[in-house]
Image (cartoon, helix red, strand yellow):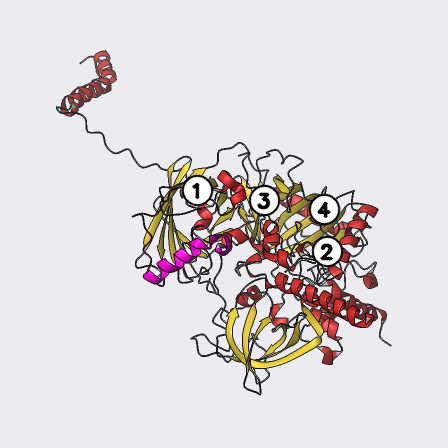
Amino acid sequence: MSPRLRLLLCALSPVALVAGVAVISLAVTRPAQPVQLAEPAPYRAPRAADGKPDLNGIWQALGTAHWDIEGHAARPSPVVALGALGAIPAGLGVVEGGEIPYQPWAADQKQKNLENWLSADPAVKCFMPGVPRANYMPFPFQIVQTPEFILMAYEFASATRVVYMNKPDFESPFDTWMGHSRGRWEGETLVVDVTSQVGDTWFDSSGNFHTDSVHVVERYTAISPDALLYEATIEDPNVFTRPWKMSMPLYRRLDRNVQLLEFKCVEFVEELMYGHLRRGATK
Amino acid sequence: MKHPPLASLGPLAVFAIFSWSTALAAGQAAEPSTSAWSPPRTPWGDPDLSGIWDFRTLTPLERPSELSGKETLSDEDAVKYEQDTLRALDKDRRTSDGLTAEQDVRNAYNQFWWDYGTKLTEDKRTSLIVDPPDGRIPPLTPKAQERADARAAALQRPAHGPEDRTPWERCILGLNTGPPMNPSVYNNNLHLFQNRGYVVILTEMAHDARIVPMDGRPRLPEDIRQWRGDSRGRWEGSTLVVDTTNFTDKTSFRGSGANLHLVERFTRIDADTLLYEYTIDDPESFARTWSAAIPMTKTDEPMFEYACHEGNYGMTNLLEGARAQERLAEETAKTKSK
Amino acid sequence: MRPNPSVALAGVVLVLMVAAEPAPAHHAFAAEFDADRPIHLEGTVTKMEWINPHAWVHVEVEKPDGTVEKWMIEGGTPNTLFRRGFTKKSLLPGTKIVVAGYQAKDGSLKGNGRDLTLPDGRKLFMGSSGTGAPADGSDPTDPKKPKK
């Protein structure tokens, strides 16, 4: 074979190879039946510096879970003067299965709470909402993620909590309003184990409650660039007949230059809580 | 993300800042660090200031008048000062040790509850204030003095309502958190977090997270005021500079007012030390600007939740006590007039 | 006659007694509690509220005539104790304690725990005191730091 021909064949051979492979592939894969599309690959969030899914951002729930985590029709406000703007909108509910599995005594207690919610709901007094309620208050919260700690800072009442990512044996010496959070990654999901929460926080403004034995396991999974799926499994052997679960999306706040602003509500509840003790107040 | 400044600028900047603060403390200056230590970097190249920092110290904010002119103490005098101070502050001293009943009530409870440190700053300074050189807060303007007098009067009398009391008794702010942070009687801790766009200063007291955007975004509009103001951050070499404005007229740091412009600087000068400096720029309230420098020590002891408002029996009790005092005064007046 | 620097330092210390706390008192103890109503109680802990801004110890005191008074005694921030290794199990119901303090201005059964001790005179929450609490599995002589 002449050198020139050899050279030509060398140059053409990859082309021929590819063309040949293409012809063969086409012949082999050309389907005889309608195309079966694979499930779209689950969303994969951008990575943080340490290679973990990046959940940094300002997030907020929509919907009416903060009013009532179970499905409910709209209902009026107990504060007549607020009219339509104080009334409670309807909601499909965020509890999987629909109903919270209360023990009989607890179902009665929930009813009492509901009837007295205006005076009994700790959030009315600007007490920190606890977990999971803090995540679905109608206020933004910010996730600040580092490898060792994940801070969640809530606009409501300036509540905060720190998730310890590498201290699985760190027990809290006492019970706290925002609980004690220890986290780990399971693939794309941040799993947070919340223990040592006081029994005084509620799940919503409808009297859904727990005791200080409550144990919450949260899951945060990015489902799109601007949304997380938030799931929380609740256990409290004093109150419920079995563990139960809630889930809802958390939406990224996209407003330009969005930032948490101050909602230091203690000032707004002083008249409510201490007004009767003011100088000159009639008892 | 911009390229970080050359690493060689880092320690120079640190040296410059440390020298500035010690030079301002005219007189016996502490030995500035001359080693070319530069802080570790975050994965995206910023100096790493993250962690839990402890700012206990026996050095007071203002230089005591008895020590005027003495910016630092000799090692021997410092030890004596520390021992004398700890003895004087010991809350387990009671009336049998010479205290009056009023002093005894004010001391409140056992020493084991308190945690204000056992040492002066490492450079043995007699004040945290480094400027003006006399180590004291400059005089208040007449307007600021009026405000301070009104606050003092409200605190002296049986409280008319919660607004008569300090923001920390009301559980709105922490007693050592400002901003600016300033050492006090316990829980002198903060946890600093960093991610690409933000630095967050979480102070233990009143569970407050001050979120500082680092992206150069505009400030809040003039008419949005916040108890902690509104902070914006930037890097100057290895120093985090935080600029805070938009305070309310209800916050006051040692007499400051709504138009305070607070500048804070955070510089990690060695593995275990975060030098925290702040400048109070508030010409409406003070005759001149003033600045303090507070070394903070890295700690691996955790911070704990400080839920304040949720357990504030004290507010109810002090208001009930005030009303009881008034009733007693009324009854006494009635009896006298009979 | 002491040399000057020491005299100056001694004088400073008195100033510091006030200066260590932001003036005025960080908490309105003078507003809540009455310097003219000192109390001395010996009783049994029924509950300890490990809360901020101040912990509260609930104590039942049996009077000589057999009646029982229920007192609430104010302490400091529990966070200081947690950092030293104490936990909510460190002062359990049933513990006998002695309280020296001052009663609330409104005459209610509240006081500040000016000095909290065990019946044998040891202070609560000191390194080797233990608390006399029923055994809870933790070493009473050496409070463990929280596990890292």
Q: Position of residue B292 (x, y in %)?
A: 72, 51
Choose mark 3 or mark 4, whichever is in front.
3
Q: The N terminus of chain A is located in which quarter?
A: top left
**Identity of the residue drawn at 76% across and 61% down:** B156
Q: Is residue B225 above or below residue A242?
A: above
What is the spatial separation of the Cα atoms under label 4 and label 2, in whole angstroms? Answer: 12 Å
Element carrying mark 1: loop
Residue at image mark 1: A55
Question: Quick check: B270 left or right of B323?
Answer: left
Choose mark 3 or mark 2, whichever is in front.
3
Q: Residue A31 carries which label?
A: none
Label 2 is placed on what type of residue?
Answer: Leu
Residue C104, located in which quarter of the rendered image? bottom right
Residue at image mark 2: B128
C-beta proximity under 8 Å, tags 3 and 4: no
Q: Mark 2 lies on which chain?
A: B
Query: Which residues are drawn in magenta?
Result: A94-120
